[in-house]
Amino acid sequence: MIDIEIIEQIQRIQELGQRPKIADPFLALTKEVGEVAQAINSEDHGKNKKLKETSAEECVDVINCALELFYDRGGDFDLLYNKMKEKLDRWEKRIDKRDALRQKTIEDLGHAWTAEEAADFNNM
Ligand SMILES: [Mg+2]
């Protein structure tokens, strides 16, 4: 769980408006997304490029930059919390519905899905 103090620290830093390298938070976010792509490419496809950080660590940079952009665009903690909760609740309901449909389909078929059937379901 993200500690509220960390969110407040990100907001304080954003309010100072002193990003060290890239002044535009949107550009900083896109740069970090690119670093995640490079790390994934290296980790998953055997590229030998020496990385400063893993893809998971680069994802932390993406989250930091996304939060900075969020505050830069006028977001606040209440919006972050309420909108995040609303979206997570919606996604959780969707997952529950899909699981129920998957279970019913397995019962109707009388056997577990083949990989092809599962792929078809996941593309619905
Ligand atoms: Mg980075």
Image: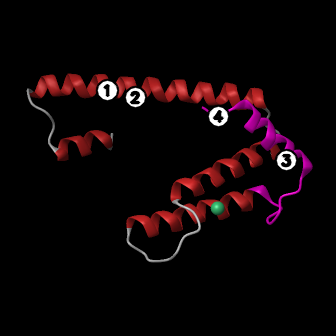
Q: Is residue 13 magenta?
A: yes
Camera-near label (2 vs 3) is 3
Q: How is the image coloured?
A: secondary structure
The label shown at residue 13 is: 3
Q: Quadrant of residue 2?
A: top right
Residue for badge 1: 99
Instruction: Tell me the distance, in whole angstroms, between the alpha carbons under discs 4 and 3.
Output: 17 Å
Q: Quadrant of residue 25?
A: bottom right
The label shown at residue 49 is: none
Residue under the point 51% across and 26% down: 90
Instruction: Say what amino acid the circle numbered 4 marks.
Output: Ile
Instruction: Tell me the distance, in whole angstroms, between the alpha carbons under discs 1 and 4.
Output: 28 Å
Tell me where the magenta segment starts and ends, as one range. Answer: 1-25
Tags 1 and 2 touching, CB below 8 Å: yes
Whole-percent x and y of residue 18?
88, 56
Residue under the point 42% across and 75% down: 47
Residue for badge 4: 2
Whether residue 22 is situated above or below residue 95 in the rendered picture: below
Instruction: Say what amino acid the circle numbered 2 marks.
Output: Ile
Left or right: residue 60 versus residue 122 is right
Residue for badge 2: 95
Q: How many marks?
A: 4
Whole-percent x and y of residue 10?
78, 43
Residue at the extreme bottom of the image, as rendered: 48
Instruction: Tell me the distance, in whole angstroms, between the alpha carbons under discs 1 and 2.
Output: 6 Å
